Image (cartoon, rainbow, N blue to C red):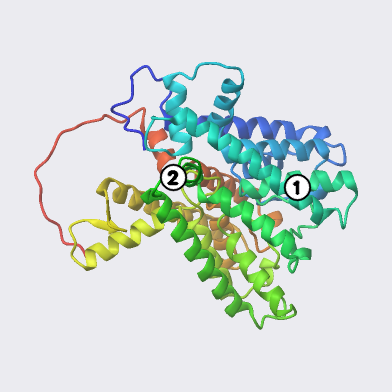
Amino acid sequence: MINMDMAPKNRGLDPALFLVISFALVILTGALLLMLPISSAQGKYTDFLTALFTATSATCVTGLVVVDTGTYWSHFGHFVILLLIQIGGLSYAVIATGMMLLLNRRIQLKERLYLQYSLNTTSLKGIVSFLKSVLISVFVVEGLGALSLFFVFIKDYSFLKSIKFAIFHSVSAFCNAGFDLIGGFRSFTGYVSNFHLVFTITSLIIIGGIGFIVIYDIMQRITKKKMHLSLHSKIAIITTLFLIVIGTLLIFILEYNNPKSLKPLSPWGKILGAYFQSVTPRTAGFNTLDIGKLYPSTLLVLIILMFIGASPGGTGGGIKTVTFLVLWLSVVAVLLERKNVHFRNRTITWDNVKRAYAVFLLSLTLVILAWLLLLITEPFPPLNILFEVVSAFGTVGLSTGITPYLSPFARVVIIITMFLGRVGTVTAGMAILVPVSKRSHVEYPTEEVSIG
């Protein structure tokens, strides 16, 4: 993370504040475009709250919707949503700097600082080269994903519609957005046993969610014969695989005899359904099983997966996989009375550990507060409301079906939760406190307190 004290004083806006403002401006612009008659299939104006909810969900790559994406919006509306998803998945700083590179403009220090913050890298060194690799990998992966999905949709739709569906769902999957054009709030429930679609969509979700740092690290190892992956990459990959496997097993076991989900499917369909639903909570929002018909125990498993989310520097939300593992490693260090936190023969700095706890506590506070507000105003079961809130925070987009029926107040709460979940609770806190913060280096006397 950027050392704010070492950054130049003429760098312009604080990077955290820039990130928050840029996302807010993109959302507002998207909302205004979606309000236009040309954006709706009926050719009518859309009310501001519905447009704002959709624009926030798209820019924050969430996928929660109050109107059916496939049938309510026009082709122009779908294009606006797709553009918001792509900008939100990469961040405005990445898109803008990429355009500057295309125009052969020199990237100034200020832009490099914004890039570092947006991509969540630890150093400014090689940041432009890193950006180029990110942009290339994004469009190559999305292109291959679209090509693969085309051969799925061409069996059910016309040629032009198949192209549109392939491109839209590839970008939506890679950016972990979860928006779909199938219609009827069905997502991919009609493709639960389709291996081609399941493999393509989950691969896009995993690659987009694993983080650009990991993608770049792997590319460096392949192209430049780099000997070892970084500790960050190892943690992100190991934690991601662990959560996918555990999630698949739990969903498979819990839903095996559920007549409204896995029970009617073949053994192969059961495995594909459980696997797909284990991948998407982190943090894509597509579903091949009807979420509203899952058992409460399964919903709790999905809530945990949504809260953890994807990996740092990727297109997903949540507290992130690396944060999750660092928290548990710190607990182990305390229980074993170790002086430092270790993983794979490496020591994790206490600054990283402190940041992990800050992310966890701020995120938990946000979720509890939003849950409390919706419990007061909404008539739905508490678990369903918690599911909706965590889905918004983790920028997931899965829902038990209550989103279209939320009150205006609840929609505003969900909008704020999606926004803070995407920009990050710590980033938002830093952006708010920067104008009033005084970077003091005064050290006070040390005194012990009783813990636990």
- Which badge, 2 or 1, is on the more N-terminal residue? 1
In the picture, the quarter occupied by the C terminus is: bottom left
Residue position marked by numbered label 1 in the rendering: 147
**Residue at position x 70%, y 81% from top?**
263
In the picture, the quarter occupied by the N terminus is: top left
Q: Where's residue 251, x and y in %?
A: 59, 73
Whether residue 206 sits left or right of residue 214 in the image: it is: right
Specify the quadrant of the image occupied by residue 10. top left
Question: Can residue 261 be seen in the rendering of this structure?
Answer: no
**In-front residue for pair 137/286:** 137
Total marks placed: 2
Compared to 215, does 8 lie above or below?
above
State the SS at label 1. helix
Q: Where's residue 432, x and y in %?
A: 41, 34
State the SS at label 2. helix
**Residue at position x 40%, y 39% from top?**
429
**Residue at position x 77%, y 48% from top?**
166
Residue position marked by numbered label 2 in the rendering: 425
Q: Which mark is residue 293?
A: none
**In-front residue for pair 25/413:** 25
Q: What amino acid is at disc 1?
A: Leu
Specify the quadrant of the image occupied by residue 41. top right
Compared to 419, does 190 lie above or below?
below
Whether residue 33 sits left or right of residue 379 in the image: it is: right
> In the rendered structure, are the residues bearing label 2 and label 1 in contact, judged by CB atoms less than 8 Å apart?
no
Specify the quadrant of the image occupied by residue 142. top right
Residue furthest front as drawn: 225
